Amino acid sequence: LHVSNRQKLLKSLRQHLSNSSRPHHGFVLLQGGEEQTRYCTDHIELFRQESYFAYLFGVREPGFYGAIDIATGKSILFAPRLPADYAVWLGEIKPVSYFQERYMVSMVYYTDEIVQLLVDQYKGSGKPLLFLLHGLNTDSNNFSKPAEFEGIENFERDLTTLHPVLTECRVCKSDLELALIQIANNISSEAHVEVMRKTKAGMKEYQLESMFLHHTYMYGGCRHCSYTCICATGENRLGLSQVLIVSCLVRSME
């Protein structure tokens, strides 16, 4: 799926550059999500990958960068170089070969090698060109965050081209994406039915929400939901007769 998504972006971006009489060189560069702690504590919140990065690379771990060479079509992942004590708390430190095979990319290096690797791979003249993700999400009125890393001053940066092209790629779903969305919807539908089967008079809203979340995770393997549960009973039903409303879709292809 993610190989297909990268190919789709590459085709659209090359076409856009051709229409603008611009050369087909440079790199698409995206920064994945980072782990976040709860305020000032050492509690790490459940990680959820940044959506554009997930669309192109499917990486489930935090701290990654991803690049696509427009000239050659090669895809490159940059993994964080983890300290030895990571293994004590979080398990085996995977080699870069593991991520190359798992995510079906051309190459994998460490994040501290971004500058040298991209400079070496670049075939154009002057400073290497980076197409970075920066644009407005009209639903949230928040801007996507362009990639940042030490040494970025060694590159030319384009902040306007990538966002509209990549966003348009995500609008039209492929057959693979539709199949994945259908799986997510099936799991969500089953969970709705499960809640209806087990609902009894006098139950609390949090109990109904808990049943839904349990079913999607226990039987559907879905740890994330797209949004929080809409579950109204009693005075919270907002005049919607005596109907119990439970509306909560599991995460699909956001």
Image (spheres, helix red, strand yellow):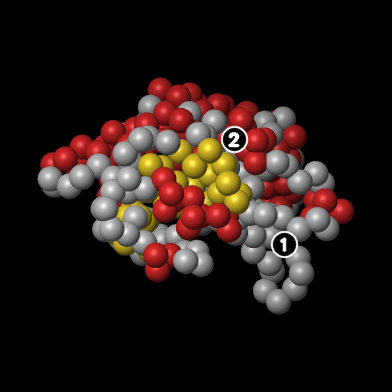
Q: Amino acid at mark 1?
A: Ile
Residue at the extreme right of the image, as rendered: 88
Q: Is residue 21 visible?
A: yes
Side (left or right) of 56 relative to 243 = left
Residue at the extreme bottom of the image, as rendered: 40
Q: Which mark is residue 100?
A: 2
Image x and y of residue 163, in percent: 32, 52
Mark toward the viewer: 1 or 2 = 2
Image x and y of residue 65, in percent: 52, 51
Mark 1 lies on residue: 44
* Residue at the image position 38 percent from the left and 27 percent from the top: 174
Pick the residue in front: 149 or 176.
149
Q: CA distance from mark 1 to mark 2?
A: 26 Å
Secondary element type, mark 2: helix
* Residue at the image position 69 percent from the left and 60 percent from the top: 45
Q: How many marks?
A: 2
Q: Is residue 5 above or below residue 119?
A: above
Q: Are marks 1 and 2 in contact (CB under 8 Å)?
A: no
Instruction: Examine the image and state in which quarter residue 44 appears.
Output: bottom right
Secondary element type, mark 1: loop
Q: Amino acid at mark 2?
A: Gln
